[in-house]
């Protein structure tokens, strides 16, 4: 067995709640709270309804669907919930080495399995942190972001992380845990070319259900490669953009905690995270300066090539396109003075003033700006030239949304906004407080009953 693959299996088998730092538990609870909010928000999204129509959902089943009274087999619940959580691209971002959406790949699998076996809140938190650390350790091995090869890490690493989390819940031994992540690695998929389409949220749901079933298959005795992460034809070598993978470094499990050192970013804007430097910088700047859209002659966004790989639409035609557009981020911020779910609709994207301003936005790419992980890379810059000859020069730093430092008022405000159409504020608050005190929860039934059951699918 390869040393890295062996280390992953041993870590999954040996991980326990008492070894997890309080900061990691706090980050995990914030991430799970945010996951619940965006999943409830995504319950009526067309892609959610489409995927759900192919699954058997009713009054019976292992796990709840969309935090509602409806139930399904755990694999179906993980699929539908993962799709819903990523449907609006409003879910969290993490994994500093390869920015991705960890919670929508890991949490649906972990919660579905936890519910099927009546696991405790501590079990859920242990599984979540285990999954996150496995994902981060593996991702940190490659010197280059996988997006530049065309991979969507949420779908690739996400399947492996989901398997790690469910393997922890199932209390698999080290050898079985290796089989679980190895089986999941053969199901890892997701392509950047599908960003801005319904298939992108499908990546998250598929990763969740693939990981869940990989762990169950491993428990049943299914065989798989014992050196899936070390092999010359294994996962890391296969998906690497240029083969710059460090296979030799000892694993840092239990010595450094990625979830603490790098955190999980809770999105404050319902757009691709690649646009959040623009959004955050402009929101702060526009609070002090008035920029009239009709007086702008040009806006140039100076950034690194890898940071715009996900921003695939320079001329978005609809709201789904707009989520992945730097041009829309600039135009919407200046015109609406905000970018919320209200601006992410086809009518706003089609407005003449929005389209005119988007046409004035240019990208200037400098490879030197790509050094380091996403939130530690050099600042970007936005230069806005005005008709009277003046210009506004904005420094665009890392967004203000780390889960380990996010204040609870901000997190609750987003949770309430996302759930308002489905839950009375009283019920939303009860669900939020349950998620924020998971370590005290004796059984998953406390999470999936009560307030959560007030959510209506399609209502």
Image (spheres, grey):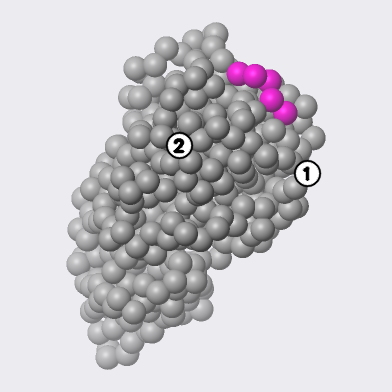
What percent of the width, then of the height, locates residue 452? Answer: 63, 26
Report the Cα–Cα distance between label 2 and label 1.
29 Å
Q: Which residue is mark 1?
A: 18
Find the residue positioned furthest to the front. 1
Residue at the image point whose x is 34% and y is 17% from the top: 54
Up-down relation of residue 2 to residue 249 (above or below):
above
Side of 165 where 365 appears, left or right = left
Horizontal relation, residue 69 to residue 183: left or right: right
Which mark is first along the chain, 1 or 2?
1
Q: Which residue is mark 2?
A: 226
The residue drawn where x is 56% and y is 25% is 112
Q: Position of residue 149 (x, y in %)?
A: 26, 55
Number of other residues with Cα within 10 Å of mark 1, as a class: few under 14, some 14 to 19, many 20 or more: few
Looking at the rendered structure, the secondary structure element under dot 1 is helix
> Magenta segment range?
116-120
Of residue 242 and residue 121, the one placed in the foreground of this image is 242
* Magenta segment, prevailing SS (helix, strand or loop): loop
Q: Residue at x 45, y 21 (%)?
A: 222
């Amino acid at each position: 067995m390869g040393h890295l693959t062996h280390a992953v299996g041993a870590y999954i088998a040996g991980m326990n709640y008492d070894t997890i730092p309080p900061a990691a538990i706090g980050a995990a609870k914030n991430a799970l709270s945010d996951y619940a909010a965006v999943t409830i928000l995504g319950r009526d999204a067309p892609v959610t309804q489409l995927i759900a129509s192919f699954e058997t959902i009713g009054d019976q089943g292992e796990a709840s669907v969309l935090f509602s009274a409806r139930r399904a087999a755990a694999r179906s619940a993980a699929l539908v919930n993962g799709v819903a959580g990523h449907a609006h691209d409003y879910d969290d971002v993490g994994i500093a080495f390869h920015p991705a959406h960890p919670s929508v790949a890991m949490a649906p699998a972990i919660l579905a399995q936890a519910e099927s076996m009546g696991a405790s809140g501590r079990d859920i938190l242990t599984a979540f942190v285990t999954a996150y650390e496995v994902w981060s350790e593996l991702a940190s091995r490659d010197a280059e972001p996988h997006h530049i090869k065309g991979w969507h890490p949420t779908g690739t690493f996400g399947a492996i992380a989901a398997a790690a989390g469910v393997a922890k819940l199932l209390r698999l031994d080290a050898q079985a845990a290796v089989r679980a992540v190895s089986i999941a690695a053969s199901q890892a998929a997701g392509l950047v070319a599908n960003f801005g389409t319904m298939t992108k949220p499908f990546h998250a749901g598929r990763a969740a259900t693939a990981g869940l079933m990989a762990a169950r298959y491993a428990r049943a005795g299914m065989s798989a490669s014992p050196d899936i992460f070390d092999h010359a034809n294994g996962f890391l070598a296969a998906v690497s953009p240029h083969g710059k993978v460090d296979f030799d470094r000892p694993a840092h499990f239990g010595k450094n905690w990625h979830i603490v050192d790098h955190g999980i970013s809770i999105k404050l804007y319902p757009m691709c995270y690649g646009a959040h430097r623009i959004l955050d910088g402009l929101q702060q700047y526009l609070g002090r300066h008035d920029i009239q859209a009709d007086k702008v002659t040009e806006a140039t966004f100076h950034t690194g090539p890898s940071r715009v790989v996900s921003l695939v639409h320079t001329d978005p035609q609809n709201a789904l396109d707009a989520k992945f557009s730097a041009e829309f981020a600039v135009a919407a911020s200046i015109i609406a003075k905000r970018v919320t779910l209200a601006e992410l609709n086809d009518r706003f994207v089609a407005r003449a003033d929005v389209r005119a301003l988007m046409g004035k936005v240019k990208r200037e790419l400098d490879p030197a700006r790509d050094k380091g992980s996403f939130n530690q890379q050099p600042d970007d810059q936005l230069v806005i030239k005005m008709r009277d000859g003046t210009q506004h020069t904005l420094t665009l730093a890392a967004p203000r949304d780390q889960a380990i430092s996010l204040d609870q008022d901000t997190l609750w405000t987003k949770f309430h906004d996302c759930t308002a159409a489905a839950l009375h504020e009283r019920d939303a608050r009860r669900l939020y407080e349950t998620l924020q005190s998971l370590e005290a929860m004796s059984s998953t039934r406390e999470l999936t009953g009560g307030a959560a059951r007030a959510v209506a699918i399609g209502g």
